[in-house]
């Protein structure tokens, strides 16, 4: 199988549309190193496994010797991409942009190769936009009509709702970087990238190939993954948190997550069809194991599966039990509960609850409020009939 066939076979699993396959094949046929643009605004310092779909495709290209241009939108972050937003994004400080940039790079290293400077280059769009003259920018704007910009779906929605649209939001797509051979983005970024192709054509450049990728609902089964909705599986989440969040997934999304977020081979995917129907709980454990394995390795994935089975397999503990990190490993029972509940319960209420046998640690009752504990990762507390939490040490 040729390089082109291998890449396309890999990409077909997670890609939604190609603009266009013919152009992509022509690029590969030239046997030259391609430049793949990966552009991010650093408004919020987190990436989730939905973002990583694009990163894994880029990693595949890196493994074939192509270069990823990691384009940090430090300039455009100060404007704010209006994609999917019904209101203007807040402006963030340069200090916060730098902090977020460092966190982005840390998370991206979980997927992309940083070991070879010939395979990755980090750039910032402030390098050119920060020094661009007003006349240069006006010439760029002359090429785009108002009707083209206002046709964007989120702007049409705001118009229908009689909500404001600010000028800096309208020009955001014009600032989209366009010096690349290929870009891989979620389908919600297609408008910006198609405008990039438009500019490339006007400047007599080769138009970039655009690959859009599949966007799945988050673990709530409703909206796409978002930190604000807390329905995401973050690259920055610990292996245990990743495992636990997968277990909250609706049964109807099990197969979709296997296809988009794991490397399970096609024959095994067919087995998952039957498992997801016959035993969705077991299928989700398998899915969680595969996702943890992809980011943290086989050893960690097996350890998390074993921990989950030991803790939750009898279903005595709720699957959505929250993780809690105490201030210290060695602590009195009363102090631990005070940390967990904050102002929700008084000291007298907590002391009475303990003395009446309402606090259980790993299936053993604790009745002495002053008892000293030496906590371990995975310790499970039940407080009363409905409150559970699981210890996660720093």
Image (tube, rainbow, N blue to C red):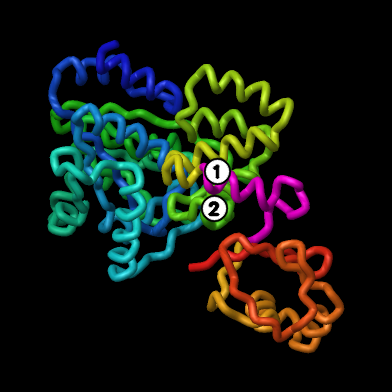
Q: Is residue 79 visible?
A: no
* Nearer-the-camera pick, 97 or 158: 97
Residue in the picture at 32% in, 29% down: 210
* Nearer-the-camera pick, 220 or 195: 220
Q: Quadrant of residue 146?
A: top left
C-alpha separation, residue under disc 2 versus residue under disc 1 = 22 Å
- Mark 1, residues whose alpha carbon is within 10 Å: few (<14), some, or many (≥20)? some
The answer to if 278 sits in the magenta stretch is no
For marks 2 and 1, the one nearer the N-term is 1
Q: Is residue 57 visible?
A: yes
**SS at mark 2?**
helix
Determine whether 63 is above or below 326 in the image.
above
Q: Position of residue 47 (x, y in %)?
A: 42, 50
Magenta residues?
302-322
Horizontal relation, residue 2 to residue 12: left or right:
left
Residue designated by label 1: 224
Q: Position of residue 31 (x, y in %)?
A: 14, 19
Determine whether 129 is above or below 150 in the image.
below
Residue in the picture at 21% in, 53% down: 124
**SS at mark 1?**
loop
Residue in the picture at 73% in, 79% down: 344
Q: Residue furthest right?
A: 356
Horizontal relation, residue 144 to residue 326: left or right:
left
The answer to if 304 sits in the magenta stretch is yes
Residue designated by label 2: 240
Q: Position of residue 88 (x, y in %)?
A: 45, 58
């Amino acid at each position: 199988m040729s390089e082109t066939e291998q890449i396309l076979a890999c990409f077909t699993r997670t890609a939604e549309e190609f603009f266009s396959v013919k152009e992509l094949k022509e690029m590969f046929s030239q046997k030259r190193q391609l430049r793949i643009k990966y552009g991010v605004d650093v408004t919020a310092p987190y990436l989730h496994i939905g973002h990583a779909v694009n990163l894994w495709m880029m990693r595949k290209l890196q493994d074939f010797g192509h270069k990823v241009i990691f384009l940090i939108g430090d300039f455009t972050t100060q404007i704010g991409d209006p994609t999917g937003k019904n209101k203007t994004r807040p402006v963030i400080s340069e200090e916060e942009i730098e902090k977020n940039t460092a966190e982005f790079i840390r998370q991206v290293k979980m997927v992309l190769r940083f070991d070879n400077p010939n395979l990755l280059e980090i750039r910032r769009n402030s390098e050119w936009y920060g020094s661009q003259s007003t006349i240069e920018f006006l010439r760029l704007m002359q090429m785009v009509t108002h009707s083209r910009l206002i046709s964007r779906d989120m702007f049409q929605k705001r118009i229908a709702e009689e909500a404001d649209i600010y000028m800096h939001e309208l020009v955001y797509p014009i600032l989209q970087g366009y010096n690349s051979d290929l870009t891989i983005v979620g389908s919600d970024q297609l408008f910006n990238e198609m405008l990039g192709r438009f500019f490339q054509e006007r400047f007599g450049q080769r138009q970039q190939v655009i690959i859009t990728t599949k966007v799945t609902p988050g673990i709530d089964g409703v909206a796409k993954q978002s930190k604000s909705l807390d329905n995401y599986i973050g690259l920055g989440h610990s292996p245990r948190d990743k495992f636990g969040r997968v277990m909250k997934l609706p049964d109807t999304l099990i197969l979709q997550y296997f296809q988009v977020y794991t490397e399970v081979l096609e024959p095994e995917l067919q087995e998952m069809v039957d498992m997801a129907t016959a035993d969705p709980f077991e299928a989700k454990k398998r899915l969680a194991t595969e996702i943890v394995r992809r980011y943290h390795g086989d050893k960690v994935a097996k350890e998390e599966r074993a921990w989950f089975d030991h803790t939750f397999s009898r279903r005595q503990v709720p699957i959505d039990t929250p993780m809690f990190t105490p201030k210290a490993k060695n602590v009195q029972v009363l102090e631990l509960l005070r940390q967990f509940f904050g102002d929700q319960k008084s000291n007298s209420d907590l002391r009475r609850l303990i003395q009446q046998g309402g606090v259980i640690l790993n299936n053993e009752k604790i009745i002495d409020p002053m008892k000293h504990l030496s906590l371990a990762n995975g310790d499970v507390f039940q407080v009363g009939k409905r409150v559970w939490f699981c210890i996660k040490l720093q």
